[in-house]
Amino acid sequence: MIISETIKLNDKSFTKTYSDAGFYIERNGVHYAEAIDNIGSDREYTETEILIETEPETTEEKIKKISAKTDKNSADIEYLAMMTDTNLEG
């Protein structure tokens, strides 16, 4: 299904259009992974049956993402403990 939503870039609003199923969208014979247009441009897109191919994440990339999330969660927990004067050591 085609999704259109309003996004902000550099304090300006635009319409972002894309397929929620990971297919290319098309307008006037040109395929796009996503389109960003000025609001009110009234450009219409159709969903194709061509799947956007993406490279699978490597194990290293997955580990980096998980580590970043873990680091953020740890920092959040430490901050909350500090703000509530809670001893996390036992």
Image (cartoon, rainbow, N blue to C red):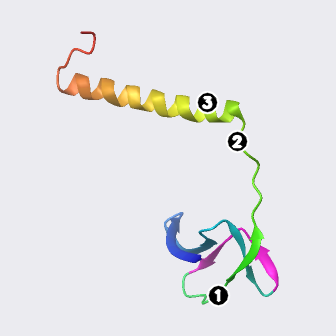
Location of residue 81 with respect to 17 vertically, above or below: above
Nearer the camera: disc 3 or disc 1 = 3
- How packed mark 3 is, by other alpha carbons closer than 10 Å (few <14, some 14-19, many 20 or more), is few
Separation of disc 2 and disc 3 at Cα? 10 Å
What residue is pinned by disc 3? 63
Location of residue 65 with respect to 83 vertically, above or below: below
**Which amino acid, by three-letter code, is at mark 2?**
Glu
The image quarter in which residue 64 lies: top right
Which residue is pictured at 32% across the width and 27% down the height? 77
What residue is pinned by disc 1? 43
Which residue is pictured at 44% across the width and 32% down the height? 72
Q: Is residue 34 magenta?
A: yes
**Mark nearer the N terminus (3 vs 1):** 1
Callout 3: SS: helix
In the rendered image, residue 32, in percent from the top left (x then y), is placed at: 74, 72
Location of residue 52 with respect to 4 vertically, above or below: above
Residue located farthest toward the right when viewing the structure as drawn: 29
In the rendered image, residue 13, in percent from the top left (x then y), is placed at: 51, 73
Is 32 positioned to the left or the right of 83 in the image?
A: right
- How packed mark 1 is, by other alpha carbons closer than 10 Å (few <14, some 14-19, many 20 or more), is few
Callout 2: SS: loop
Q: Quadrant of the N terminus?
A: bottom right
- How packed mark 2 is, by other alpha carbons closer than 10 Å (few <14, some 14-19, many 20 or more), is few
Range drawn in magenta: 29-38
Q: Main secondary structure of the magenta part?
A: strand
Nearer the camera: disc 1 or disc 2 = 2
